[in-house]
Amino acid sequence: MNDPTLIEDLRDLTVVAPAGDAGTLGLAAPPVLDLDGLLEIACDSLVEAGWASLSVLPYLSAELITALRNEVELLDNSDAMKVAGIGRGEDLVQDRSIRRDRIAWLEGHTDAQATLFQLLERIRHELNRRLFLGLKRFEAHYATYHPGDFYRTHLDSFQGRASRIVSLVLYLNDTWGEGDGGELQLYDRDLPGQACARVLPEGGRMVMFMSEEIPHEVLIAGRTRYSLACWFRRDEIPLPL
Ligand code: OGA
Ligand code: MN
């Protein structure tokens, strides 16, 4: 598959309400599925392919996405975001040939973050209930990629550490075009080097994948790219990666 358009959102599980009765009544069509239904599809896809790409706007309001984006924009503009590293603790290194984003950890203290954390807890609960993953907690950070920034192909966790089990990325950009770069490219877990999806970081899109299985990379961003990354973990207390 050399044509990148072919691998774009191949497994886009977005459920669009049919343009039926609600339209004629002048009401916004309600989502066909409730959040549980959406998470069921996401879990099935995690088992089958190791990843899922979802549009969560009907479940997570546009206002919340905007509030989160305003937070990360403010942090970025006030130079409060730190150059991201690779590894943990004493092994932490900053290698600009591998990643160039800046990050700020979320504490859940603002209203927007508290609302988001409730949703992430619900997702953690569903992942455990449906997939028996034994996830104990999550951690989350904002990330900013400025023009020219990227994150080369990597795994979020190494097998056997029982640390990061499921990764989740939520995009906070208003709009994102084909020419803007900065896509998340996912690689097939069974076919080394074979890209299986390229996801535009549009506001309200959420990607989930198995942290130990799915290699992925952030392609060079052509404009400032805001996102939020979260990892559901099996350990109770942070251990070095
Ligand atoms: C990461 C990562 C992907 C993205 O932060 O580890 O891979 O699309 N992020 O921002
Ligand atoms: Mn990653």
Image (cartoon, grey):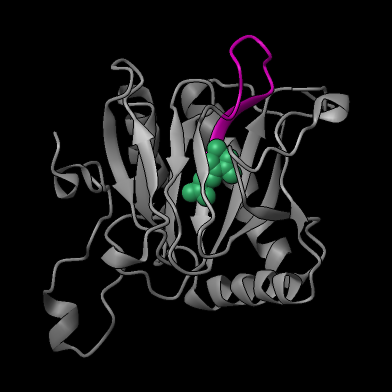
Residue 194: image quadrant is: top left
- Asked if one can make out residue 235 in the rendered structure from this viewpoint, the answer is yes
Residue at 28% from the left image edge and 17% from the top image edge: 191
Q: Quadrant of the N terminus?
A: top left
Query: Outermost residue toward the front?
Result: 97
Indicate the position of residue 132 as horizontal and vertical percent values: 54, 20
Q: Is residue 156 left or right of residue 117?
A: left
Q: Nearer the viewer, residue 172 or 182?
A: 182
Residue at 60% from the left image edge and 38% from the top image edge: 124
Q: Is residue 9 left or right of residue 67?
A: left
Indicate the position of residue 129 as horizontal and vertical percent values: 53, 28
In the image, residue 169 above or below residue 77? above
Query: Outermost residue toward the bottom?
Result: 26
Ligand 2's quadrant is: top right
User: Quick check: is 181 in the magenta stretch?
Assistant: no
Indicate the position of residue 46 as horizontal and vertical percent values: 39, 29
Residue 195: image quadrant is: top left
In the image, residue 5 above or below residue 50? below
Indicate the position of residue 148 as horizontal and vertical percent values: 51, 59
- Asked if one can make out residue 105 in the rendered structure from this viewpoint, the answer is no
Q: Is residue 211 left or right of residue 138?
A: left
Q: Is residue 134 left or right of residue 211?
A: right
Main SS category, magenta section: loop
Residue at 40% from the left image edge and 64% from the top image edge: 202
Number of marks: 0
In the image, residue 112 above or below residue 42? below
Q: Quadrant of the C terminus?
A: top right
Q: Which residues are magenta?
A: 156-167
Query: Outermost residue toward the top?
Result: 160
Q: Nearer the viewer, residue 147 or 186?
A: 147
User: Quick check: is 158 in the magenta stretch?
Assistant: yes
